[in-house]
Image: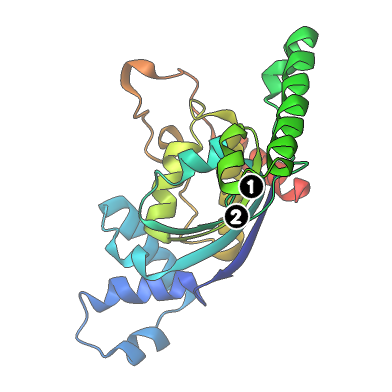
Amino acid sequence: MRVTLLAYTPEPDRLVAAAARLCYSPEDPAAILEGLTPGHQKKLLARLRSAGHDSPLEHAAFTFTIEGVSRSLSHQLVRHRIASYSQRSQRYVSEAGFTYVAPPSLRQSPAAEERFHQIMEEIREAYKDLVELGVPREDARYLLPNACTTQLMMTMNARSLLNFLELRCCRRAQWEINCLAWKIRALLQEAAPLTFALSGPACLVRGRCREGEHTCGQPYTWEEAERLGREMEEEE
């Protein structure tokens, strides 16, 4: 998995703070921006989060490229609807020799791991055979598994990203999208440290789990979140 923060709104912390201040200030926007010192930004953004006044966060947008993830992950990702996505097409791009993601749980059983890889090879060959027999790629792709890798571009605003992190950094999130979420969090905290200072799973940010009776019972600590952030940066 490779995640790159491709582009984002310039000075996102300052912009979000300015949007928040503008709602309650008689000053014009230029004067508001000029008077926003880092200290003022920090106080305003902390107040926003604690008050749940999240609409100013929508003014900052972040665009990522995401590579080497499975179609299983991308199907989960697009459930976050306040976002824009562009994904490599299996209709127009050949998937002969496709790569795939193997779940880590397979390593618990050598027999299961062997069987999984065997099936992937069989699907590769079957896809190739169908195309060579004249079947259009858009139809041959019906053979392709959820494990097949893809690449995509995703743009989300800060408000949607905070919601994404709250849901997908949770221990109960599926392992692949959980890994993606922690990688995205690490990149965001570098690009907009004040906006994403309080970001991550609900147990960490809100002090309570949102999963109800399905809670894992293992709340994150800030120390653990910092360690995960460092690990994700090192992987990149």
Please tell me which residue lies in front, 208 or 139.
139
- Crowdedness of circle 2 by 10 Å Cα count: few (<14), some, many (20+)? few
Residues at discs 2 and 1 in contact (Cβ within 8 Å)? yes
Q: Do we see residue 207 in this rendering?
A: yes
Judged from this view, the residue extending furthest toward the front is: 133
Residue drawn at the location 33% of the way across and 15% of the way down = 213
Residue 217 is situated, as x and y percent measured from the top left of the image, at: 45, 17
Residue 56 is situated, as x and y percent measured from the top left of the image, at: 31, 67
Q: Amino acid at mark 1?
A: Thr
Quarter of the image where one finds residue 26: bottom left
Residue drawn at the location 72% of the way across and 50% of the way down = 233
Residue drawn at the location 44% of the way across and 65% of the way down = 42
Secondary structure at badge 2 equals loop
Q: Amino acid at mark 2?
A: Arg
What residue sits right under mark 2 in the picture? 88
Vertical order, 85 against 109 (above or below): below
Marks 2/1: CA–CA distance: 6 Å
- Crowdedness of circle 1 by 10 Å Cα count: few (<14), some, many (20+)? many
Coloring scheme of the render? rainbow
| Labelled disc at residue 167 | none
Label whose residue precedes the other's in the sequence (2 or 1): 2
Residue drawn at the location 42% of the way across and 60% of the way down = 158
Secondary structure at badge 1 equals strand
Drawn side of residue 5 relative to residue 37, left or right: right
Please tell me which residue lies in front, 220 or 37.
220
Vertical order, 90 against 153 (above or below): above
Residue 109 is situated, as x and y percent measured from the top left of the image, at: 75, 9
Drawn side of residue 66 relative to residue 86, left or right: right
What residue sits right under mark 1 in the picture? 150
